[in-house]
Amino acid sequence: MEEKILEKTSEYIEKAAEDFNNVDIDYLFKVVDIHKDIKEVECMNNYGRYGNYGEYGDYGRRGVDARYRGESYMEGMNGSYRAYEESRNEYNNGNYRAKEDGLKELEYMLHSLVKFAKTIKEEATSPEEQEIVRKHFMKISEM
C-alpha cells in the first residue's frame, strides 16, 4: 500500500516540477509531505533490518499519540552515537569499510536530533518556553 502511495506521490511531484505554473501549491505541499513521511518510515524500517532501531512502523506518524516521541528520538540518537563511535574505532584500527557505516550512523544521529528539536519546538506552548527554545536554538545556530 505504501509503495503505491509513494509511486503516485512521485508521479505527481514529477508532473508538478515539469509544469509548475499550473500547480496548486497547497496540494503540492501536502503531497510532498506525505511522500517525505513514507520515505522516512521506509528508511527507518530499512535501518531496523541492519541496525538497532527495530521496526519503526506507525510510531511517530501524524495522528499517532506523540507523548513519547522525544524519548524515541533520544533513544535513536543514543544508539546511533554508540554505533558511530564503534565505527570510528574500527576505522582507526584499519577497517576502512567502517568509515561508510560511521557516516551513516552520524546521519541517523543528526536526523534524530533534528526531529527531537522539532518536537521540543512544537511542544513549547507558553511564551516562556518558546523564549527558552529560541535562546538555545540560537546558540546551536552559532556553533
Image (tube, rainbow, N blue to C red):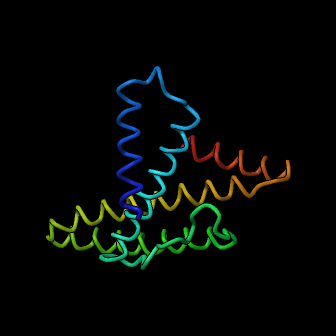
Give the quadrant of residue 129.
bottom right
Residue 80, percent across and down?
41, 70
**66 sits left or right of 103 in the view:** right
Residue 7, percent across and down?
35, 51
Residue drawn at (64%, 58%) of the image? 119
The image shows residue 2, relative to residue 10, as above or below, that is below
Residue 32, percent across and down?
48, 44
The N terminus - image quarter: bottom left
- Of residue 140 and residue 111, the one placed in the foreground of this image is 111
The image shows residue 95, relative to residue 39, as above or below, that is below
Residue drawn at (38%, 64%) of the image? 42
Residue drawn at (42%, 55%) of the image? 5
Give the quadrant of residue 41.
bottom left
**65 sits left or right of 31 in the view:** right
**59 sits left or right of 132 in the view:** left
Residue drawn at (78%, 49%) of the image? 130
Q: How many marks?
A: 0
